[in-house]
Image (tube, rainbow, N blue to C red):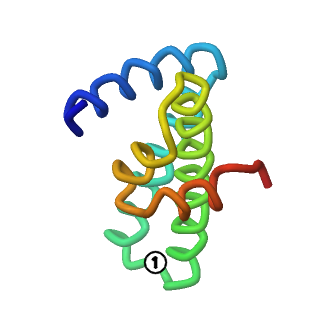
Amino acid sequence: MSARETARELAQEIATHQEREHVPGAWTDLLDDAKNLHRAKRLNSTPAEQLIYLHHLAWTTERITRATVDASREAGHTWQSIGDLLHITKQAAQQRYGTKP
């Protein structure tokens, strides 16, 4: 299966998982965090204020990534295909996302 086909299949699986797990709220959070960071930078906020927004953005992104990896594994995708899509080794993907923190 090509990377494009795998990505398309994963996108369909993600959409199904998001509906089940209420991840769409996380996507809204991610967009809000990105908008807040952009606004903060535009308004010349302090680096500390920008770090707060970056932290929230990173946390939300990690939450979405973990949910998506879980959905991919439940759908039968290998650690190799997940690692390829994340541009990391299969071992790195399994170590990072194989168990929930």
> From the viewer's perspective, is 63 left or right of 1?
right
Q: Residue 19 location, x and y as percent?
A: 56, 14
Q: Name the residue at 56% across, 42% down.
A: 64
Q: Nearer the viewer, residue 65 or 74?
A: 74
- The vertical placement of 9 against 62, above or below, is above
Q: Residue 88 location, x and y as percent?
A: 41, 63
Query: In which quadrant of the rendered image does the C terminus lie?
Result: bottom right
Q: Name the residue at 35% across, 60% down.
A: 87
Query: How busy is the neighbourhood of tag 1: few (under 14 within 10 Å), some, or many (20 plus)?
Result: few
Q: Specify the amino acid type for callout 1.
A: Ser
SS at mark 1?
loop
For this orientation, the residue located farthest to the right is 101
Total numbered labels:
1
Q: Name the residue at 55% across, 61% down.
A: 91
Q: Name the residue at 56% across, 20% down.
A: 17
> From the viewer's perspective, is 17 left or right of 8?
right
Q: Residue 82 location, x and y as percent?
A: 44, 45
Name the residue that disc number 1 marks: 45
Q: Nearer the viewer, residue 90 or 62?
A: 90
Query: In which quadrant of the rendered image does the N terminus lie?
Result: top left
Q: Nearer the viewer, residue 5 or 53?
A: 5
- The vertical placement of 64 against 10, above or below, is below
